[in-house]
């Protein structure tokens, strides 16, 4: 368990609403405590709250970047070890039927019959 505090300053002020939304959600879910439970809670909250994959990516990327920032500024690399708890769910690829391109034995026999006649 690691504690932190979010402070908005410099270019972050008024730059983008997503920074505010992301930092507020990060704070609501963690209350300044970085642990597998709090970051899993953040991930689940984001996936439930937003429908868009882009929204998921923005908030979770913000949290991952914040962990990297904490690891760098505090010289404590253990912050980054929590990043896997914030990964996006894997997208399922749609499988397309390719049966129209498959050549069957019957097709070959028909072709050969036409060639020999």
Image: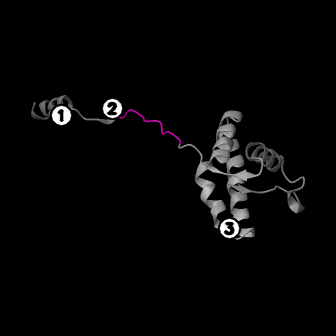
Q: Quadrant of the N terminus?
A: bottom right
Q: Residues within 10 Å of mark 2 (few under 14, many from 20)?
A: few
Given this view, does label 1 or label 2 mark the residue nearer the observer? 2
> Which residue lies under the disc numbered 3?
76
| Magenta span of residues | 91-99
The label on residue 32 is: none
- Identify the secondary structure beneath mark 2: helix
Mark closer to the chain start, 3 or 2: 3
Above or below residue 29? Residue 109 is above
Viewer-closest of 75 and 97:
75
Q: What secondary structure is marked by label 3?
A: loop
Please determine whether, in this image, residue 64 is positioned above or below residue 43.
below
Give the residue displayed 81% in from the left and 56% down from the top: 5
Residue placed furthest toward the front:
1
- x then y, percent, for residue 38: 68, 46
Residue 8 x %, y %: 87, 56
Q: Using a 10 Å C-alpha cutoff, classify the residue at mark 1 as few (fewer than 14 neighbours), some (14 to 19) or many (20 or more).
A: few
Frontmost of labels 3 and 1 is 3
Q: Is residue 16 magenta?
A: no
Query: What secondary structure prevails in the magenta region?
Result: loop
Location of residue 37 by image quarter: top right
Query: Which residue in the protein does label 1 denote?
Result: 108
Q: Residue 9: x, y in percent?
A: 89, 60
Disc 3/disc 2 C-alpha distance (Å): 55 Å
What residue would you read off at disc 2?
99
Query: Do the CB atoms of the residues marked 3 and 2 lie less than 8 Å apart?
Result: no
Vertical placement of 11 versus 91: above or below? below
């Amino acid at each position: 368990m690691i504690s932190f505090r979010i402070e908005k300053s410099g270019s972050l002020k008024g730059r983008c609403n997503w920074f505010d939304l992301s930092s507020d959600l990060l704070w609501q879910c963690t209350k300044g405590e970085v642990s597998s439970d709090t970051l899993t809670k953040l991930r689940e909250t984001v996936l439930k709250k937003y429908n868009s994959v882009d929204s998921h990516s923005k908030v979770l990327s913000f949290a991952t970047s914040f962990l990297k920032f904490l690891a760098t500024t505090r010289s404590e690399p253990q912050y980054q070890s929590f990043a896997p708890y914030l990964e996006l769910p894997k997208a399922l690829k749609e499988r397309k039927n390719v049966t129209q391109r498959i050549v069957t034995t019957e097709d070959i026999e028909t072709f050969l019959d036409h060639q020999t006649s």
